Amino acid sequence: MQDDTDMDEDFQFLQPIDLITKDVYELQKIIKEKKEKLRQDKPRGKDKDNNVHEREHGREPAREREKEKQLKEKEQDRDQEREKIEKDKEREKNKDKEKPREDLMDAKANGDKDVVRHEENGKTADPEPMEVCTSSTSLPCEIPSSDVMVLEGHTSEVFACAWSPDGSLLASGSGDSTARIWTIGDGPCHSRMQNGPVDVMVLKHFKGRTNEKSKDVTTLEWNGEGNLLATGSYDGQARIWNRDGELVNTLIKHKGPIFSLKWNKKGDYLLSGSVDKTAIVWDVKSGEWKQQFEFHSAPTLDVDWRNNNSFATCSTDNMIYVCKVGESRPVKTFSGHQSEVNAIKWDPSGSLLASCSDDTTAKIWSVKQDACVHDFKEHAKEIYTIRWSPTGPGTSNPNQQLLLASASFDSTVKLWDVELGRLLHSLNGHRDPVYSVAFSPNSEYLATGSLDRCLNIWSVKEAKIIKTYSGNGGIFEVCWNKEGNKVAACFADNVVCVFDVRI
């Protein structure tokens, strides 16, 4: 195992975007290549990293080398294919006919996001096209600029955003080593903009006047009362702030970047998951760690509370563990995924656990059995995240059907009927990987954000887009306020946008 110094040196070779978009083997490869280049640029001498390179090379699986080969081939063809598509697009401007589906398929297959994203008919290249914005000459569901509040100030990609429980504050976390708390308040966006700049508090994760390395904010979450904000950083530290932006506590024990932070409902424990393979439960009142869980053999990617004392963790080691505070071993182990598990989420009642993986499946688990309850295999590529609908027992919508949404690199979002274990709808409106999904509080709508730079608002019942917005950067996260009349989205072009969603 690397010591702290070696680990810090390795992180210097990575960009914040790498943590979000690449798996652990790709991260290792980047580190190895940059170290190799650095060594070649230096005078010959003893290389203390030789053993590290050998270990990393030996751990690089054949499938990753094949993936690298395919990506290189794809990149070589990209310029040629783009030129061909642009010529096709120019010819089609002079026709009244809809662009042939074969051209759309080619464009999507070759990664040309700009061509496909702006199709006026709003349809995707999926084999099962959907009705999206009925007019073929305009986009009546395009969110007007008067309903968009653009929050500027971050100087790097914005990875995370979260509304306070009362809906008056919006927190954002960025690769610029800061989190920010924006005062949004009630009322439409245009009235707020007329009143001048939005009040903002800057939560610095570095000391001094200039940014330090490895302080990028990767995750954040408000506690249930909305008086404390927890942030997780690339430097392995968790921090707790109050609503006024004052640092309350710094939680130091992890030896790698923190990817996930969750408060329990009671608010007395904070749970963190890290690249250092562990999860830690922190006693919020004392600011000390209560228990460290060291079950995984690879980076911990996500954690989620089941109740106030038990939780689940998932990892790039393909495993899921259900743990309990005070217990030295997992109370339940779920194995079945064939690749790294990207996200886990307990349903509102705490009886079912959903997981999604690079193996292209989403699975539903119950602590009452070892094998998964449902195995959803309809996605064509990696599934990045999942969300339960706020419906069923224990929610404000107890009589509505419980659904699971999954967002994938295949550019689709799928809605699953959990009771029957089947696909309910495939939402085919994006043209690039979908990184975030969020149900509205009444569960009638779904917000999705993609690397194609589009925010889409879907009607869950009709399975079609009812509002859309095209920004200037990929979208990493979307979230609804408690009233369900505003959606926030954070972008790769350093901005956070707040949208009025009056449906």
Image (cartoon, grey):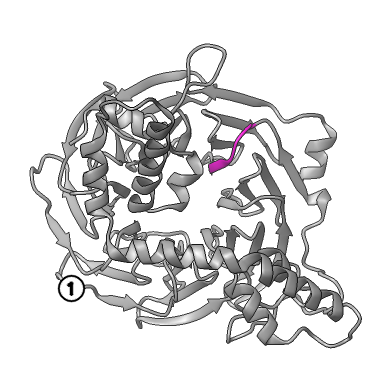
Query: Which residue sits furthest left?
Result: 328
In-image side of 151 versus 193 (left or right):
left
In this rendering, would 462 be left or right of 233? right
Percent x, y for residue 346?
A: 32, 58
SS of the residue under disc 1: loop
Q: Is residue 249 above or below residue 479?
A: above
The span shown in magenta is 154-161
Write down the residue under mark 1.
371
Q: Quadrant of residue 316?
A: bottom left
User: Does 171 sit above or below residue 431?
Assistant: above
| Left or right: 465, with 311 as reference point | right
Q: Is residue 222 visible?
A: no
In the image: residue 450, left or right of residue 394: right
Percent across and percent down for residue 485 are 66, 53
User: Quick check: is 460 in the magenta stretch?
Assistant: no
Q: Residue at x 79, y 78 (%)?
A: 88
